[in-house]
Amino acid sequence: MITSKIIANGILRAIGFLVLAVVSLYFIYLIQSVLIYLIVALILTLIGNPILDFFKNRLKFKHILATIATLSIFVLIIAGFILLFIPLISSQGENLSVLNTSEIEKKITQLINQVAVFLESHNIDSKQMLQEANITSKLNFNFIPNFLNGVLSTIGSFGMGLASVLFITFFFLKDRLLFIVGAKKLIPDSHEEQILNSVHKINHLLSRYFIGLLLQLFIVFILYVIVLLIFGIPNLIIIAFLSAVLNIVPYIGPLIASLLAAILTMLSNLGSDFQSVILPTTIYVLIGFWLVQVIDNNVSQPLIFSKSVSSHPLEIFLVILIAGFLSGILGMIIAVPLYTIFKVIGKEFFPENAIIQLLTKNI
């Protein structure tokens, strides 16, 4: 028989659970920076594990020395990027007038007028339409300096974040066996073998995935630089780097990168004749970027997605597509690693399931 006391206890438990959930979420919100540090450090650890093993197995380094050598490689790569891009941003960023809102609006207006003149020369009366639409007055260019101010404030805390990530990564690499031993004590004996096998396979597959992803981005960056260099586009390092980074977002990123390259190409050639210089150069750059994507989609990505995580390209495409619908761009970025984790866990804990057998036959 349900009494008022039982109902009251149930309500109190529900309220207590709700309060605990809210407090937990708020606590996670407060320490979100720490969680980001941990995630980045975990990714670096996955990338660094093969390097650490190389130093230990091939070069016969002691474990602590191999850990220091691996971390030193990360530091040198990060320092190289900083030394390479900070002077470029300071000099070439000034050429792009990214801090001058009025200059940006002036260039966009000039470009729109040139497009209108070009269309009018081909008997398309669009100049009056563009002027009546008054596009530039409807665009708020203040977001650019505001965005850069946000970037600068982020860079201000970048040093502490970088030091924290490297510190955490060092201990993740150095004490990985200690973590495994500690985890064994917390894992129920009945599932110990399955969980440890899952962790080993996930570590192996994701290490291959992230290393392959870095290699893919580097290849795309070099190809973008070559394309922009051929057509003499100013600020080519910055444009190529931003376009390569956008490639992290599957399918949508390359489209945004092409649009970015087209706009910056047109702005870089303002003052030249639109029909004979700006339009042909922009089309050539877009064709070059399209060729880079053809190479990337048919060579780089299949090697990374199919071989590194042992999944069919169509399977990966559907996973990324579904993740995009469910969680947007962030979902598309984390779709492949997360899907790989689920596949490994499924194979270890539900090996008799027919669907899981089909999806994990290559793992």
Image: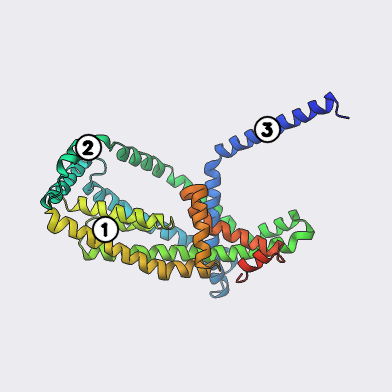
Residue furthest top as drawn:
4
Query: Callout 1: helix, strand or loop?
Result: helix
Q: Nearer the viewer, mark 2 or mark 3?
A: 2
> Which amino acid does the dot numbered 3 rest on?
Leu
Residue 70 seen in the figure: no
Marks 3/1: CA–CA distance: 53 Å
Percent x, y for residue 277? 14, 58
Q: For the point 63% across and 63% down, which residue is it?
A: 344
Q: For the point 52% across and 53% down, which residue is it?
A: 323
Kindly identify which residue carries mark 2.
Answer: 133
Q: Earlier in the sequence, mark 2 or mark 1?
A: 2
> Which amino acid does the dot numbered 1 rest on?
Leu
Kindly identify which residue carries mark 1.
Answer: 236
Marks 2/1: CA–CA distance: 33 Å
Query: Callout 2: helix, strand or loop?
Result: helix
Kindly identify which residue carries mark 3.
Answer: 18
Q: Are marks 2 and 3 in contact (CB under 8 Å)?
A: no
